Image: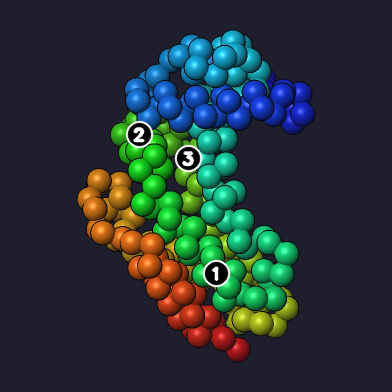
Amino acid sequence: MPRLAGQIDLAKGEAILDAAIQVLGERGLAAPMEEIARRAGVSKQTIYNHYGSKAELVRALVHRRVADITAPLEMPGADEHPEQALTAFAREMLHALINPRANTMMRVYISGATEAPDVALAVFEAGPKASRGRLAAFLAREHADGRLAVDDPAMAAEFFGGMVVGTYQLAGFLGVDRGLTHPQIEVIALEAARRFLRAYSL
């Protein structure tokens, strides 16, 4: 059973996650936990004590990435400045799509989904579902505060996510270079935020 938060050294936990990214990226979901433990400088039991299973280890990896992407929605003052918050969120989403390591890991998860459905479910729940959920919570606050008219925050979150990633996400998974540059990301992020806010304006 995984340990409660605080029962393992945080630095050791980060070392485990960093090692997991390396090993899974190289060897796929079938990679042995022993190799992850070796690179992290811990015992295999330490990994199981902290995460409980490979699926939960992967969930933690995805959760860490999603926390970075959704951070702009939870920064102080984000609710009062929805255009800036949504633009920053969109920017983080797009930067993730051109991150080689992130794309490598997603291809690993997809290729191993059939053999490891528990891992696939963990990736979905900690990744897309959690990301859209945090966006939906942000939009619900905007609606409650009278800044936007968002009757269905979950649906609106899906609309915004689709507007931002478009076909760039699939291209990244397939290893196709769409030539997405940092200046283009800025344009797409701002335009998506502005068009979305116009659609849900009061």
First in residue order: circle 1 vs circle 2: 1
- Which residue position is annotated with label 2? 108
Give SS at disc 1. helix
Q: Where's residue 147, x and y in %?
A: 66, 82
Q: Can residue 130 be seen by looking at this rendering?
A: no
User: Which residue is at the front of the view, 35 or 4?
Assistant: 35
Residue type for callout 2: Val
Q: Secondary structure at mark 2?
A: helix
Task: Give the class, few, some or many, for how many residues have Cα within 10 Å of label 3's Cα (few <14, many ≥20).
Answer: many
Residue 105 sits in quarter: top left
Residue at 22% x, 50% y is 176
Question: Is disc 2 surrounded by few (<14), some (14 to 19) or many (20+) residues within 10 Å?
Answer: some
Give the quadrant of the N terminus: top right
Residue at mark 3: 123
Marks 2 and 3, how far apart in space?
A: 11 Å
Amino acid under disc 1: Leu
Q: Is residue 40 above or below residue 80?
A: above
In the rendered image, which residue does mark 1 sit on?
86
Q: Is residue 188 visible?
A: yes
Left or right: where 9 falls relative to 119? right
The residue lying furthest to the left in this view is 176
